[in-house]
Image: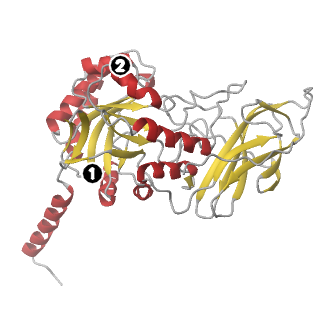
Amino acid sequence: MKLSYITKYIFISTIFFVFSSTYAQAIKVEVLKVDGQWVLMRGGEPYYINGAGGEGFMEELVEAGGNSVRTWSVDDAQEVLDKAQKLGLTVMMGLWVQHERHGYDYDNEKANQGQLEYFTKMVKKYKDHPALLMWSIGNEVDLFYSNTKVWDVVQEIAAMIHEVDPNHPTNTVTAGLDAKEVELIMDRAPDIDIYGINTYGEVSIIRDKIREAGWDKPYIISEWGPNGHWEVAKTKWSAPIEQTSHEKALSYYDRYNNHILPDKEMCIGSYVFLWGQKQETTATWYGLFTNKGQKTEVLDYVSKSWTGKWPTNRAPSLDSIFIEGQTKHQNVKLLADNRYEAVVYASDDNDKMKYTYQIYPESMNTKSGGDLEKAPPAMTGLIKKKKDNVVEFRAPLEEGPYRLFVYVEDDVEKIAYANVPFFVLPRDKNMKQSRPIQLKKRNLKIVD
């Protein structure tokens, strides 16, 4: 059927009006102090953030009881905002302020102006999207920096946002919490409405530290998770010792319920890290998912924290792994090309468990501040014999540091994991070889 030009015009105008009415009306978000407590208000209603750092797996976030996602930049902003809106989520939209440690010069006024102009365009473009929750100006710009002029630039961006977008608050995010940075932000960037803190092992002391530093506005825990790779014990060859997925699950549960949630006076929510997967020291250190999209044991505990209920089917729980009776804390040393045995202790609620073993060289491409790292390739031909929770493997030929990983999967795409760092010595090294010992079944600590 042919349409007249007038009919076409009316049709197109109607579609545009409906689209504009649905997607181009901002929902006002503000921070208010109510009865002595800071509250984030969205559309006139209190809004406590149970958020996730990373814009992937949004359907799983909703299923787990989360309500917001955090981005670090405006890359794919329209797609992220639209999908969040469709699923009933909000977005803390990141503005990637350049880092001095990456070579940016904050004494370069032309560059600063260019950055400000770009952010002004982005704020104007997305400010009316109903899924937008707040603007996050920079992430850890204080990491290894010396030029505090960055806070003047952050202030310029925050002031611009307040002028251009009266409906959304601003925050900036620091690496941990230092009283000096708090003082600088209060003095040099007064248009920052909310303090964002990326913190891991130190989350338990943030409540006191932020008050001691003098911050008198609300704050969020903008990243939280397991013990950071810079916070843990190391082997004698300086390999950081990673928590098992079960140890992480318990720490996530404790940090949310005993340290983040209880600060009703100043903390208005948090973003768990990482809602996805990345290589950072290892491939499993921070992600709540695997690179194949499998849900980890940690995610169950986060969901329990947010909803008060366990998922219908829980992930396997992996307590520990031993190489020749030695734990990851015992500086395991092996002779090149010799055969060894490892034993894993894991359990599951109902499902049959599948064990997968891999050996990787220790990553030599580690970076700071979450910068992109290249994952080392898995080594082939070293896993010789396996039967469920027992594996026999051959040590690599070359001297150096490695890790033995174990992954325990159920039949519903859920997974637990652990790894043991070990060091390979040359075959002519005079080292007494231990043999496997019988270990008693271990009882896992499970949160009810």
Is 251 left or right of 167, judged from the image as shown? right
Numbered disc in front, either 1 or 2:
2
Q: Position of residue 211 (x, y in %)?
A: 34, 23
The reply, left or right, for residue 132 in relation to residue 328 is: left
Residue under label 1, please give it.
131
Query: Would residue 306 be visible to someone looking at this image?
Result: yes
Q: Report the residue at 37% width, 43% height from top.
A: 70
Q: Residue 285: x, y in percent?
A: 58, 40
Q: Quadrant of the N terminus?
A: bottom left
Q: Within 10 Å of the Cα at label 1, are there few (<14), some (14-19), or many (20+) other Cα atoms?
A: many
Residue 322 position, x and y percent, is: 77, 41
Disc 1 element: loop
Determine which of the numbered discs, if any, sits on residue 212 in the image.
2
Q: Which mark is residue 423?
A: none
Q: Are marks 1 and 2 in contact (CB under 8 Å)?
A: no
- The residue closer to the viewer here, 66 or 132, is 66
Image coords of residue 306 (percent x, y): 42, 50
Q: Amino acid at mark 1?
A: Ala
Who is closer to the viewer here, 245 or 305?
305
